[in-house]
Image (cartoon, grey):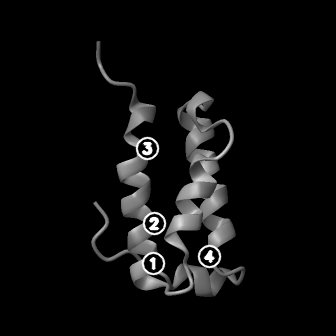
Amino acid sequence: MPEFLKNIYNKKFINNLANEFNNNYSRFDPDKFVNDIFSGDWKQKELKAGMRHIAVTLSNHLPRDYTRALGIRMDDCE
């Protein structure tokens, strides 16, 4: 059976994402970000709900100032 698309957002992907943000924003706490992603009902979320959860959680870990948050970039994100 083919793999579900939602499964690309796995522990490895989220850890890599967290590390990329930490490399470019020293106040970013990768461990807290990963814990916040996988807390609660993560396993029950479907693709769109999981993507939304990642986006909201990421916004909670970046500067509130939109211009500052935009300045944080990921150099080598695949």
Verify CB contact (< 8 Å) between mark 4 and mark 1. Answer: no
Residue 22 position, x and y percent, is 45, 78
Q: Which residue is mark 3?
A: 9
Amino acid type assigned to the residue bearing label 3 in the image: Tyr
Verify CB contact (< 8 Å) between mark 4 and mark 3. Answer: no
Q: Residues within 10 Å of mark 4 (few under 14, many from 20)?
A: some
Q: Is residue 16 left or right of residue 22?
A: left
Q: Which mark is residue 62?
A: 4
Q: Which mark is residue 18?
A: 2
Gap between marks 4 and 2 measured at Cα: 11 Å
Most extreme residue toward the right is 64
Amino acid type assigned to the residue bearing label 4 in the image: Leu
Residue under the point 63% across and 56% down: 36
**Quick check: 3 above or below 51?**
above
Amino acid type assigned to the residue bearing label 1 in the image: Asn
Residue under the point 60% across and 38% down: 42
Most extreme residue toward the top is 1
Verify CB contact (< 8 Å) between mark 1 and mark 2. Answer: yes
Residue 35 position, x and y percent, is 58, 56
Give the structural element (helix, strand or loop) at label 2: helix
Q: Which residue is mark 1?
A: 22
